[in-house]
Image (spheres, helix red, strand yellow):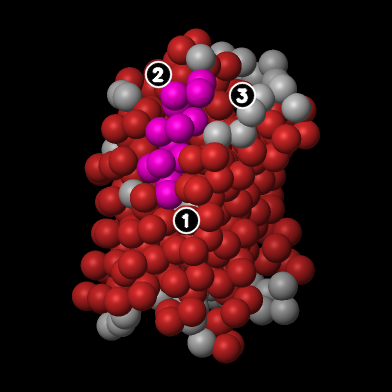
Amino acid sequence: MVLATLLFATMGVCVKLASAYYGAGEIVMYRGLVGTLILFAMTRAKGLSLKTTVPAMHFWRSLSGVIALSLWFFAISKLPLATAMTLNYMSSVWMALFLIGGAVLMGAAKVDPRLIITVLLGFLGVGLVLQPAMEDQQVWHGLAGLASGMLSAMAYLQVTSLGRAGEPEYRIVFYFSMGGVVAGALTAIASHGGWHGHTWTGAALLLAVGVLATAAQLLMTRAYGTGKPLVNASLQYLGIVFSALYGVLLFGDRLGLASWIGILLIVAAGLGATLLRARNTPKDAQHSVQES
């Protein structure tokens, strides 16, 4: 998990650099293309099957995941790297909010007040991060980063469902990568910037994004499949720290005291929501989450 978070943060650096050469849709498409080719070759070499009996589940997981990825790449292009990463890592807080909404609508469970506190704490953290780290022209990028975290939470819940359906991690990542190719290409065609020509630097950055993202996703999925969820959740937030260090060292990002306090609040809220969610989840469901 530690290596996965480091690779995701490094991918964020490459995405930020690649945004000077390509649009968000192009980066999503090439990232998916590299991942698709790597996983196709890996499954063929190991004699694994890519056939699935739940194509609709893969479609919805890929749709939410690709949109979240596109919004995140768009946010990274203009926001400080740590800010964009923090907003995307709000997924645990969003999951808690979804659980609260589901409990209220179903009326089958009493909402834990501590869960409400974690949600409010997370949103307070977001306010602290966005206000000092965002200028007027970056408002849309901040909102995109916020939406990417929400959609990422939906994608993680769908991955859990796929795991319960017996889908292995390589197949989940493969179809997600394929979805990225299609969605990224359509976005690039519809965007005003269109397609951009390649340079050696640009092509190398695209390749790095695809390789780093694919390796990180496989590592993360493997970690959740073999390790303890709470340990993994704790380690996953190291990605924010790695990204903050990258931003300061490579891009000259300056995060004030309020931004760092906001990051700590979001990390605390995410860990708290994960802990409460795990305590309220039956053991068999926890096992399914680990397998996903």
In three-dimensional space, the C-alpha distance between marks 2 and 1, rounded to whole angstroms, equals 46 Å
Disc 2 or 3, which lies upstream in sequence? Answer: 2
Answer with the quarter of the image where residue 145 lies. Answer: bottom right
The amino acid type of the residue labelled 2 equals Lys
Going 43% across and 71% down the picture, which residue do you hit? 129
Coordinates of residue 168 in the picture (x, y in percent): 50, 20
- Crowd rating for badge 2 (residues with CA inside 10 Å; few <14, some 14–19, many 20+): few
In three-dimensional space, the C-alpha distance between marks 2 and 3, rounded to whole angstroms, equals 25 Å
Circle 2: element type: helix
Coordinates of residue 106 in the picture (x, y in percent): 76, 28
Is the stretch drawn in magenta largely helix, strand or loop?
Answer: helix
Q: Which mark, by number, is residue 252? A: none
Coordinates of residue 144 in the picture (x, y in percent): 61, 66
The amino acid type of the residue labelled 1 equals Leu
Disc 1 target residue: 121
Q: Give the vertical position of 204 relative to 217 (above or below).
A: below
Disc 3 target residue: 161
Coordinates of residue 51 in the picture (x, y in percent): 63, 19
In three-dimensional space, the C-alpha distance between marks 1 and 3, rounded to whole angstroms, equals 28 Å
Q: Which residue extends farthest bottom?
A: 136
**Range of the magenta residues?**
269-281
- Give yes or no for contact between labels 1 and 3 (Cβ–Cβ under 8 Å): no
Disc 2 target residue: 46
- Crowd rating for badge 3 (residues with CA inside 10 Å; few <14, some 14–19, many 20+): some
Circle 1: element type: helix
Circle 3: element type: helix
Judged by depth in the image, the label closer to the viewer, 2 or 3, is 3
The answer, for residue 174, to whether it is visible in the render is: no
